[in-house]
Amino acid sequence: MTETEKKFWPEDTVFIVYLITVSLIITLFHRDVEHWWVYVLTHSVSAGLVIVWVRFASAGRNTVIRTLRYWYIPIVLGFFYEQIDDIIVIIHARYLDPYVYNFELALLGFHPSVVMERISTPLVTEFMNVGYHSYYWIGPVLGLSLYLKKDYIPFRRTLFSILIAFFISYLGFIIFPVVGPRYELAHLYDSPLTGYAVTRLQQFIMASGDIMGGAMPSSHVAVALVVLLCAWTYRKRMALVFTPLVVTLAVSTVYNRYHYVSDVIAGIMVGLAAFYFGKWVYRETPMGGAVES
């Protein structure tokens, strides 16, 4: 039996588990969510559709179907990210930023993003946003490299680890909703950050597609770290390019006022856990191949 013909892969399973988990959370804590049943229905039906799709695609021989078998989750993932925006305070009914910034203030004696404003210039801001923006393309670049060279198990291990990082982050947003310094500490900044082309593009993306409350943990840091570690595992030359970008990305999340330092540390922890869990699920054999757990 080929890899494609195996019906359920770990990444399919974790996707279904995530959809069911969100459905249960909404069912239990829906008191302030208008039309809450629509979200439950959306996630529940989607879980069922994934099961149907996997069974259908696993038996398919069509090239397009076989390609979508590997890529369908990245294609639809953004939709479920946006769904969180309407349910993010479903448990607490408020954002929990004061717990984070008061903790950091007590520990450090200052707000890191406010202090970093001292070094802000258009050039520094542009540099930071080049790193931050790399989040959107380093994963696809690594994934395409693995897929096009038919490194299917490395591709799937990378995707699985990325999904673990995403889904832990998404659930973290709901369990501990935080909007970030750009909203909660806005009164402490002297001026907005300005840069050039990449900065304007990134600010447009954040204004158009970001969700309120999706800061703890930093999914940008978690996912970027997973991609970097997988690149060091499978594409070392690519990893040399990714490393300074990911380091800059982690710093820029605070510099750009999107995240507290605590969010970044939590993102690093989630990224490491996701990477090593993926390594365990797709554990390597002595011959250099891989088997599923």
Image (cartoon, rainbow, N blue to C red):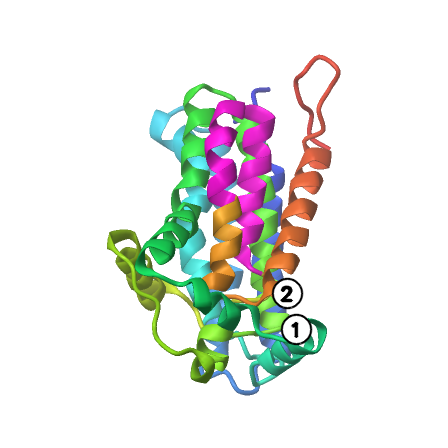
Residue 202 x, y percent position in the rendering: 33, 57
Q: Count the labels in the image.
A: 2
Which residue of the protein is positioned furthest toward the front in this rendering? Answer: 118
The magenta stretch is 218-246
Q: Are marks 2 and 1 in contact (CB under 8 Å)?
A: yes
Is residue 265 a member of the stretch shown in magenta?
A: no
Q: Using the rendered image of the protein, determine whether residue 206 is visible from the camera's viewpoint.
A: yes
Identify which residue is drawn at 48% across, 36% down. 242
**Front-lying residue, 227 or 125:** 125
Specify the principal SS of the magenta part.
Answer: helix
Q: Which residue is mark 1?
A: 104
Helix, strand, or loop for circle 1? Answer: helix
User: Which residue is more in the foreground, 145 or 163?
Assistant: 145
Q: Residues within 10 Å of mark 2 (few under 14, many from 20)?
A: some
The residue positioned 58% from the left and 55% from the top of the image is 167
Residue 226 lies in quadrant: top right
Q: Is residue 90 above or below residue 246?
A: below
Q: Secondary structure at mark 2?
A: helix
Q: Who's the residue at 67% across and 71% down the image?
A: 108
For the C terminus, give its image quadrant. top right
Which residue position holds label 2? 262
The correct choice, above or below, for 176 with respect to 228 in the image is below
Using the image, determine if residue 203 lies above or below residue 184.
Answer: above
Q: Residue at x 48, y 48 (%)?
A: 248
Question: Residue 121's image quarter?
Answer: bottom left
Give residue 266's position: percent from left, percent from top. 65, 59
Find residue 175 and report its image quarter: bottom right
Three-letter amino acid code of the residue under disc 2: Ser
> CA separation, marks 2 and 1?
8 Å
Q: 187 above or below 164?
A: below
Instruction: Please give left or right for residue 241 compared with residue 30 in the image.
Output: left
| Circle 1: residue type | Glu
